[in-house]
Amino acid sequence: MDTVEQLIGKFFFIIDLLASRSLIRHRFKTRQRTITWQQLFEGQWVPWLGAVLTAGDISVITKNILYRYKLITGIGV
């Protein structure tokens, strides 16, 4: 009888085997577009732009939280 860990390991092995890209032999009806250097460059900088915007939002939220806390507690107002 297999232990739970062995059964989980076998399950994930089967899932990995089924999902393996080397086993997928799909032919597209239309040719897929090739990624250009410009697309690659834009793809690298878009997440960083999002990170900068998120950091700005977090700083504004933190400033507002501290201001409210000081109003409620009466500290440093």
Image: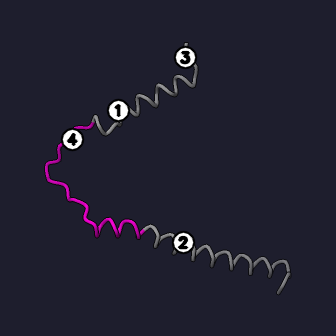
Determine whether the residue tagged by mark 1 lies in a helix, strand or loop: helix
Residue carrying label 4: 26
The residues tagged by marks 1 and 2 sit, at their Cα atoms, a distance apart of 38 Å
Colouring rule applied to residues: one colour
**Residue 67 image offset from top left, x and y in percent:** 74, 81
Determine whether the residue tagged by mark 4 lies in a helix, strand or loop: loop
The residues tagged by marks 3 and 1 sit, at their Cα atoms, a distance apart of 22 Å
Residues packed near mark 4 inside 10 Å, few (<14), some (14 to 19) or many (20 plus) = few
Q: Are marks 3 and 2 in contact (CB under 8 Å)?
A: no
Comes first in the chain, label 3 or label 1: 3
Comes first in the chain, label 4 or label 2: 4
The residues tagged by marks 3 and 4 sit, at their Cα atoms, a distance apart of 36 Å
Label 3 sits on what residue type? Asp
Query: Which residue does the image show at 28% across and 70% down from the upper left?
Result: 38
Q: Are marks 1 and 4 in contact (CB under 8 Å)?
A: no
Comes first in the chain, label 1 or label 2: 1
The magenta-colored residue range is 24-46
Is residue 16 inside the magenta stretch? no
Q: Residue furthest right?
A: 74
Residue carrying label 3: 2
Residue carrying label 2: 54
The residues tagged by marks 4 and 2 sit, at their Cα atoms, a distance apart of 39 Å
